Amino acid sequence: MPEPSSSAPTPATPTENAVAAFFDLDKTIIASSSALAFSKPLLREGLINRRAALRSAYAQLVFSLAGADEDKTERMRAEVSALCAGWDVAQVSAIVRETLHDVVDPLVYVEATELIAKHRADGHDVIVLSATGEEVVAPVAEMLGATRSVATRMQIVDGCYSGEVDFYCYGENKAVAAKQLATTYGYNLAECFAYTDSSTDIPLLEVVGHPYAVNPDKLLRREAAERDWPVLTFERPMSLRSRIPSRSAGLVALGVGVGAVAAGATWYGLSRRRRSK
């Protein structure tokens, strides 16, 4: 399994006992699927057809209701990898840049932005960990003021996506990413924080000293109760532009490197469990 890579450069001298706050993206920072939301612009630009878009939406519904075991996850990952094969990196990146604000802005939780701001004020690094592709996660993380991000990376050959996955930032791999970041940047995991809505991220919650369940699915809510993990409720989506200054120039300059937007649209359902009402 290839190792995760951060969207930010490694400092020359890591700070010992530094603190990080790790955030999941979908249903934790934003009120929906960051990747599924891009199905419409991908459809409009001809990268996917209506059948693929409908299948992605259907997959989200099925897996959010029924959950996803390892076999289902692997089958869906293979399917979406094949879907992305041959896509032009530059075209996908342009679609994301041009539609990012319209797609993501209305979805951001006020509570998440306030919590991120508090961690930054406390001198903590803020890191977004997401199964969605880097081309979505990196710009969103930058707009939120996060220090860095780690996301799913697809292999690129001659400017196109090969259909192979270099790193799948899902489940246990999020814990792997957190541990590697701790080694690289000197984080003391016992002092670090993690926030997520999904039971698939329990491995991440287990490696930090301050785990939080945010809008938890049924399995995570039960696990949080058994382990006495705090449960947070985020319920106020808002426009990102109304709270965070525009960084359009910075977004255009980003070298987004993965073509997993539509892949994430399907993968999204794999990482969600049935919600408790």
Image (spheres, rainbow, N blue to C red):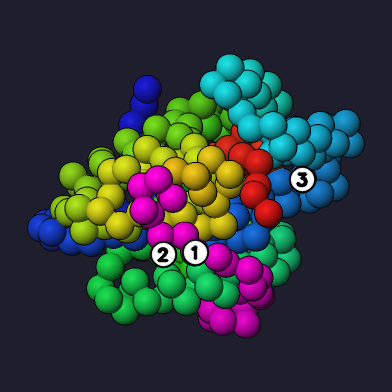
Q: Which residue is drawn at 51% across and 26% down?
A: 165
| Mark 1, other Cα within 10 Å: few <14 / some 14–19 / many ≥20 | some
Q: Residue at x 89, y 36 (%)?
A: 50
SS of the residue under disc 1: strand
Q: In the image, residue 132 lies at what x, y percent?
A: 56, 43
Label 2 belongs to which residue? Answer: 146
Q: Which residue is drawn at 45% across and 28% down?
A: 166
Label 3 amino acid? Ser
Magenta residues, start to end? 224-245
Q: In the image, residue 54 lies at what x, y percent?
A: 85, 36
> Can residue 254 be seen?
no
Residue 232 is a magenta residue: yes
Q: In this view, does 134 lie above or below 28?
A: above
Residue 97 is a magenta residue: no
Report how far apart the C-alphas of labels 3 and 2 lie in the structure: 25 Å
Q: Which numbered marker is on residue 232?
A: 1
Q: Is residue 232 above or below residue 180?
A: below
Between 231 and 13, the one lying in front of the other is 231
| Mark 2, other Cα within 10 Å: few <14 / some 14–19 / many ≥20 | many
Between 52 and 172, the one lying in front of the other is 172
Label 1 amino acid? Leu
Where's the C terminus, which quadrant?
A: bottom right
Q: Which numbered marker is on residue 39?
A: 3
Q: Residue at x 53, y 73 (%)?
A: 111
Q: In the image, residue 240 lies at what x, y percent?
A: 61, 74
